[in-house]
């Protein structure tokens, strides 16, 4: 998916060994995640872990970017798909974080079988969702990627501008 590739490209530009870049990275994540978790309502929110990491770095909690709640189940499942998938990437990124820097947020990975269980729940929701559900889910996932892209790009520009 092109949206995913763009988000990966923006966030891979952050040097996670650098305290300043890592703080900017987490701030961008917070700006997107704050909006996404409020709408998607995931079963295991990561906002508290992200807040813990930012506090450990002495950084204030940023305002979340705006995200309109489409009010449709498929849309929320699409948001959740992007959020749950980001845990997979977080596990790899946690290994790149510099020594002594907090990593509770990136270390919040899936437990054994959790990703498969999520995929099954997603499939079940799709079966029950009816006409238009899949399109709504794709819109939700794309909205999540767009929010991460916007937050990552803006924070990178601010940090290196």
Image (spheres, rainbow, N blue to C red):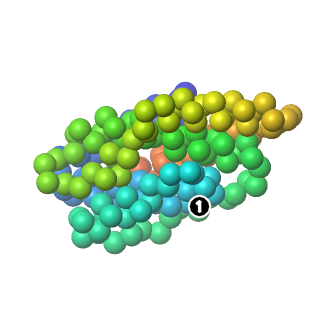
Residue 49 visible within the image: yes
Report the residue marked by disc 1.
Answer: 38
Q: For the view shown, which residue lies furthest in the left direction?
A: 99
Mark 1 Cα within 10 Å, few/some/many (few <14, many 20+)? some
In the displayed structure image, the side of residue 38 where residue 32 appears, left or right? left
Q: Residue at x 27, y 51 (%)?
A: 103
Q: Position of residue 141 (x, y in %)?
A: 61, 40
- Compared to residue 44, the image places residue 62 above or below, namely below
For residue 41, what is the image quadrant? bottom right
Q: Residue at x 39, y 36 (%)?
A: 89
Q: Residue 127 or 38: which is nearer the viewer?
A: 127
Q: Position of residue 38 (x, y in %)?
A: 59, 61
Q: Position of residue 150 (x, y in %)?
A: 49, 51
- Compared to residue 46, the image places residue 3 above or below, namely above
SS under mark 1: helix
Q: Residue at x 57, y 51 (%)?
A: 42
Of the 4 image quadrants, the one containing the C terminus is bottom left
Q: Residue 37 or 24: which is nearer the viewer?
A: 37
For residue 96, what is the image quadrant? top left
Q: Residue 147 or 80: which is nearer the viewer?
A: 80
Q: For the view shown, which residue lies furthest in the front direction?
A: 112
Residue 10 visible within the image: no
Q: Position of residue 120 (x, y in %)?
A: 63, 30
Q: Residue at x 56, y 51 (%)?
A: 43
- Compared to residue 64, the image places residue 21 above or below, namely above
In the displayed structure image, the side of residue 32 where residue 133 appears, left or right? right
């Amino acid at each position: 998916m092109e949206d995913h590739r763009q988000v990966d490209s923006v966030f891979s530009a952050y040097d996670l060994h650098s305290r300043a870049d890592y703080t900017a990275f987490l701030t961008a994540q917070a700006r997107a995640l704050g909006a996404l978790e409020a709408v998607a309502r995931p079963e295991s929110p990561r906002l508290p872990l992200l807040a813990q990491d930012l506090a450990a770095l002495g950084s204030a909690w940023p305002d979340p970017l705006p995200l309109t709640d489409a009010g449709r189940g498929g849309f929320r499942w699409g948001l959740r798909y992007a959020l749950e998938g980001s845990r997979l990437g977080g596990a790899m990124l946690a290994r790149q974080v510099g020594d002594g820097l907090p990593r509770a947020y990136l270390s919040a990975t899936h437990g054994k079988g959790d990703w498969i269980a999520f995929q099954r729940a997603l499939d079940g929701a799709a079966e029950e969702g009816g006409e238009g559900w899949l399109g709504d889910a794709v819109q939700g996932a794309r909205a999540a990627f767009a929010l991460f892209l916007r937050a990552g790009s803006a924070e990178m520009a601010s940090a290196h501008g």
